[in-house]
Image: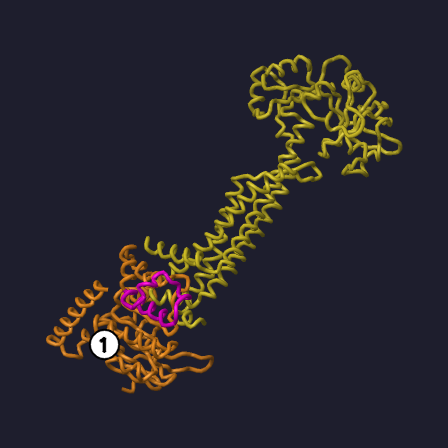
Chain colours: A yellow, B orange
Amino acid sequence: MLEKAKVSFFLAGRSIARGNKGITIFTVFVLTLIFVQLVLFSSMLAGVTLKFNELMVDFQTGNVVLEPKAEERYIEDASALQKKIESLPQVVGSTARLKTSGNFRYKEKEMGGTVYGINPAEESFVTAIEDAIISGEFLSRPDRGEIILGREVSGGFGSLMESRSLGGVEVGDIVELTVSGKSREFRVKGIYTTRYFMADASAYISRADMEEMLGIENRDLAQEIAVKTTEGTDEYETRMQLLSLGVRENIRTWHEFAGILRLIENTLGLVRNIMNAIGLLIAFVIIFVVIYVNIVNKKRQIGVQKAIGIEQNVIVASFVLQAMLYAGTGVILGYCFMRFGLAPYTVSHPVDIPLGSMSLKLDDAEAINRAVLLFLASIIGSVIPAYKLAQKDLLDLIWGK
Amino acid sequence: MEKIETQMGTKVKKEARDAEENKIRKPEESSEYFIIEGIDIVRTFWMGEVQVRALRGVNVKIRRGEFVAIMGPSGSGKTTLLNQLGLLDTPNSGKIIIDGTDTFSMSDREKGKFRLHNLGYVFQDYALLPELNASENVYISLMMQGKSKAEYESAAFDILTAVGLGDRIKQLPSKMSGGQQQRVSIARALAHSPRVLFADEPCANLDSQTSKEVLDLFQKFNKTQGQTIVMVTHEGWHAEYADRVIRLKDGLVES
């Protein structure tokens, strides 16, 4: 058994070392490209998902969100609860928000969206909305009667759903906001974009204005408290600590708000799997063709090998080993290209996508998975033609028939 | 070289002793006296719709240590007969007994194993593996037999030295002349000390001088080692090297 393996390795090694260099380089190059193609889409998807998650945490939920207890509308004693939350060392800040759906009106156009009543100073500790202002300014504590609109509400500034928006509101314009049946005019102080359409379809007013509109002035109520923790903190750990502090509110991590993101991720995942299957099929066909052409050219040699007593299995194994070596080299080159070339390049030169700047994120587990699949394709793609030809009649092979 | 000649001497003595014993104990017709017995070999091929009867019931017997030439006009079935005797092909009917082993019922795998250990081949166009150098071409079958690296490398060196290529063991076939390639081919065929060496027109692609060198080599191994050789040729002067000529005509033995 060992001597047979030795002969297979010997024949494969000599064939690669002394065979046609052009065929070897071409095959390895093609397999490298196939491997890159197989991991590229996964890396893009991982990069997009990461970006989605960052946007979600940075502009909407923070790391952890507290919501009213079951069957209650508001969190009571919000300030006291915030103090309790901020006693945890990993908490950077918290913001108590009033959140409701509202109707915006500007001239003849109307649209619905989420409206947040916030304390601007608190909000700046948790989200980066202030940094996302593209026109005008963010709210300040004493501001009353002023509103910050996302670009999907204001329209313009490259909004994705322009036709649904108010159609080009600018800073200084007056919009009418209706909340819980009460209408009031607000002056647009700023327009923001996170480039995340869900976050951009909202508006921010001061908490005092919102309390007034909801008729809950000076009652220290909130509809959600978003909590920002230091980088690298495990959100589930924070939730456990909050529970142990006696917090009875509903505590959710940002992951639980990522439902639509999961949907998008799953959809893209399906596309990725289809592309992977096509990539593997291409790999299989290329390996099959290369090995087949290689074998057809060596028909007589196979015949001679059989004639002098080299077993058929040994001959087939020598071709399979060659294909595996091609695939292995392709995988290593492809991985090095991704890990040390393309992925770091997109970190230093991010790719602009509608969501913002995206970098490739190469996942080693995914790369191993693709490498294994490529290996399997190379084994099957080489076994079939090698076995088929090696099985032919000895004299037909020797005579090159 | 000395080692080879010592081995050759021992082998020749043993063969001679065996032959002597056979003579004493058994008649010349004894199956043990013949290393190859082909009995009523029939081989037909289909070329499109036409059936070609290449061998029509050939009977041959080849003695141990004999150098036999197979001759005949084109299409007489020389190569077909060699392929049957060398187990490269399977006859439609008939028996081939090599050194007492009836090969008719052997599977392809068993035939392969039998060829590896017992038979050697020299082809018309050398049939060397182009990606292997002279030494590797020679020792590949020894590797397959499971010999150690030291064993097969030294055996390859010895036999290549014996055919006059001791200084070219690392040379690739593409860097060798036709005569040198054929000598490597002979070295490969003999490296594992086969019971029978089959050669199919081994000088067809060589000039007269090189052909002579190759045939001299055959004769040397036949005389010194007692190597049984079965050679197909169409040149009369090649056949002069042989102990006996089997003539074929229309798929039958003439003489």
Task: Residue at 46%, 63% (x, y): give it.
Answer: A295
B228 or B91: nearer the viewer? B228
**In the image: residue A140, left or right of residue B228:** right
Total tally of numbered discs in the picture: 1
Q: Position of residue A341 (x, y in %)?
A: 58, 42
**Dot 1 lies on which element?**
loop
Q: Quadrant where the C terminus of chain A lies? A: bottom left
Task: Residue at 32%, 61% (x, y): give it.
Answer: B139
Disc 1 crowd rating (10 Å Cα; few below 14, some 14-19, many 20+) is many
Q: Position of residue A167 (x, y in %)?
A: 84, 35
Residue B51 in magenta stretch = no
Which residue sits furthest right?
A107
Residue B166 in magenta stretch = yes
**The numbered mark 1 sits on a residue in which chain?**
B
Residue B221 vertical position relative to residue A110 in the rendered view, above or below: below
Question: Residues in magenta?
Answer: B159-188
Q: Position of residue A344 (x, y in %)?
A: 59, 38
Instruction: Identify residue for label 1.
Output: B66
Residue A57 vertical position relative to residue B10 in the rendered view, above or below: above
What amino acid is labelled 1 in the image? Glu
Q: Position of residue B118 (x, y in %)?
A: 27, 67
A343 or A114: nearer the viewer? A343
